[in-house]
Image (spheres, rainbow, N blue to C red):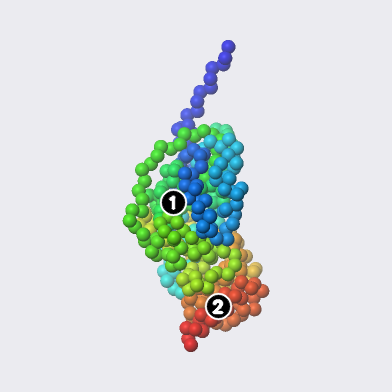
Amino acid sequence: MQPPPLPSPDWERIKQRFREQAQHLGLQDVAWTDASPAATLHHYEQWIEHGYHGEMGYLGREDRLLRRRQLEVVLPEVKSLIFVALPYWPGKFPSAQQDPTHGVVSCYAWGEDYHDILGRKLKELCRWLEQEVGGKTRHYVDTGAIQERDLGKRAGLGFIGKNTMLINPSYGSGFFLGEILTTLPFPPDPPKRTPSCGRCQRCLQACPTQAFVGPYVMDARRCISYLTIELKGSIPEELRPLMGNLIYGCDICQQVCPWMRFAGDGPSPLWGSPPEEVTTPKLLALMELDEKAFLERFQNSPIRRIKRARLLRNVAIALGNAGDPVALPILQRALCDHEPLIQEHAAWAIRTIRRKYT
């Protein structure tokens, strides 16, 4: 005699319990989708073929493309994807952003590295899920070979904007996105009707370096976030004057987006109101950092990842764009720095400032 079949799990109840766990950890939204590849994968592969990924060669590696095509390579027998959102966007930005003697740091980097913050939360959720329900899990925060924005859209977290960001109609694009892969067969959330950018092109028009080839397509090689963070070598000279005082990342295409008004007008929900030395540090002070001072100042910051040479490269460009001769003595000393990258960009800054006064 066959034993009676086991009762089917109440997946909706489990999803609700999971949401409660996520909310307890400060996560704004949770959404489920199946583990099929993103329908936009061919667009991504065309983007790679055009070379728009620049020096980020790992994005086009065949083994990583295979993972995007078959998520089973990432987690065998994967059935479901769970996406979570952690908002960080501040309602107001420091007035010192308009002061050319101060550098501008992207607001996502105003606190501890988001990979660590969200990673800890996802790890805890994975542990809860495996202990309470079962299955196997794997989590990522902007590190896995997964079309996370497109899959997050499919799960219902928002829509893709013309600036290529995932935009949530309730709080804009200023949130960190994380995902959990699981072998549990969660039913996907029902499709949501989401808005779009409509005719708006503010982000495309506001980009200082014209990094957008067109709506929804960015040439990373011209993006200031790429130039200040991902690019390891020299920044092309024709782009340097367009960078202003942006020294780590860029928020412009998000700042001008009308959907960001829903993020509120208060301090950052994650960072609060950090001091000026974090959000808009003085350029001259940064230019004098030696290796030890750099490591101490940015101990828990994502800025530490780009290392001292790249940061001071960016700072030298900002000083050149500021055009204040008071920076010349510090820039002259930087010509003797042991890092050739710093020497090169300090020399450019000196030439730029001197041209302004001759």
Res. 264 visible in picture: no
Q: Residues within 10 Å of mark 1 (few under 14, many from 20)?
A: many
- Residue 356 lies left or right of residue 347; in this view the side is left
> What is the residue that sits farthest to the bottom in this orientation?
358
Comes first in the chain, label 2 or label 1: 1
> What residue is rendered at 38% in x and 64% in y?
205
State the image quarter where residue 12 is shown. Answer: top left
Residue 102 versus residue 225 in the image, above or below: below
> What residue is rendered at 42% in x and 71% in y?
98
- Residue 111 lies left or right of residue 197; in this view the side is right
User: Secondary structure under badge 2?
Assistant: helix
Tell me the quadrant of the picture where the N terminus can be found.
top right
Residue 325 in the image, given as x and y percentages of width and height: 51, 83
Residue 146 versus residue 312 in the image, above or below: above
Res. 329 visible in picture: yes
Q: Which mark is residue 166?
A: 1
> What residue is rendered at 53% in x and 22% in y?
6
User: Secondary structure under badge 1?
Assistant: strand
Q: Amino acid at mark 2?
A: Trp
Q: Distance of mark 2 from mark 1, alpha carbons?
A: 37 Å
Q: Amino acid at mark 1?
A: Leu
> What is the residue that sits farthest to the right in this orientation?
338
Residue 332 in the image, given as x and y percentages of width and height: 59, 81
Q: Nearer the viewer, residue 152 or 42?
A: 42
Q: Which mark is residue 261?
A: none
Q: What residue does disc 2 label?
A: 348
Q: Residues within 10 Å of mark 2 (few under 14, many from 20)?
A: some
Say whether marks 2 and 1 touch (CB < 8 Å): no
Residue 43 in the image, given as x and y percentages of width and height: 48, 50
> What is the residue that sits farthest to the top in this orientation?
1
Q: Nearer the viewer, residue 39 or 99?
A: 39
